Amino acid sequence: QVQLVESGGGLVQAGGSLRLSCAASGTILGSYTMGWYRQAPGKQRELVAAITRTGNINYADSVKGRFTISRDDAKNTVSLQMNSLRPEDTAVYYCNARKSSPIRNYDYWGQGTQVTVSS
């Protein structure tokens, strides 16, 4: 049973920074693509950033240059450093672990952590 637990959310003023962390148990993350998604009220969940097991990284255009995703497979964690936060970054942020196979993807999700950016 894969379990992901996020931490680090909170309330911050625009221009501030937060660091989200995701700790995994029940599996070894080294074989997974890890990602951070977010969902704002009334909107669909969207990809923020993802990092493959080989270190390839993808960011949403809206966060490029401001957010940095990293992983520490030895500690079984993935983090998201968020700088220059904007009110539009306000959302619930979810950690995702994805293992791909030729037949299907296996997705695991954390419970989410709230990030609120005040103007």
Image: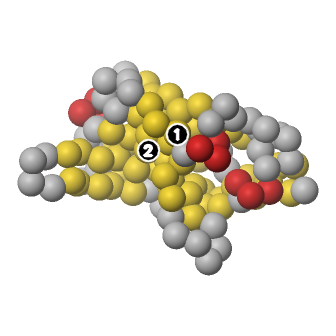
Q: Residue at x 57, y 64 (%)?
A: 39
**Front in this rendered view, residue 44 or 1:** 44
Q: Is residue 107 left or right of residue 39?
A: left
Query: Mark 2 falls on what kind of element?
Result: strand
Q: Is residue 106 left or right of residue 87?
A: left
Q: Position of residue 13 (x, y in %)?
A: 87, 49
Q: Which mark is residue 10?
A: none
Residue lying furthest front: 61
Q: From the image, state whether disc 1 or disc 2 is nearer to you.
A: 1
**Front in this rendered view, residue 42 or 77:** 42
Read off the residue under disc 1. Answer: 59
Query: Which quarter of the image is occupied by the C terminus?
Result: bottom right
- The quarter of the picture where residue 55 lies is top left
Q: Is residue 37 left or right of residue 84?
A: left
Q: Residue at x 29, y 47 (%)?
A: 98
- The quarter of the picture where residue 35 lies is top left
Identify residue type, mark 1.
Tyr
In this rendering, the answer to whether 22 lies above or below 74 is below
Residue at mark 1 to residue at mark 2: CA–CA distance: 10 Å
Q: Residue at x 62, y 36 (%)?
A: 64
**Front in this rendered view, residue 17 or 2:** 17
In this rendering, the answer to whether 58 lies above or below 70 is below
Q: Residue at x 74, y 58 (%)?
A: 88
Q: Position of residue 111 (x, y in %)?
A: 48, 61
Can the viewer see residue 79?
A: no
Query: Mark 1 falls on what kind of element?
Result: strand
Q: Which mark is residue 35?
A: 2
Identify residue type, mark 2.
Gly
Q: Position of residue 83 (x, y in %)?
A: 74, 35
Point out the tag, 1 or 2, that comes first from the N-terminus: 2
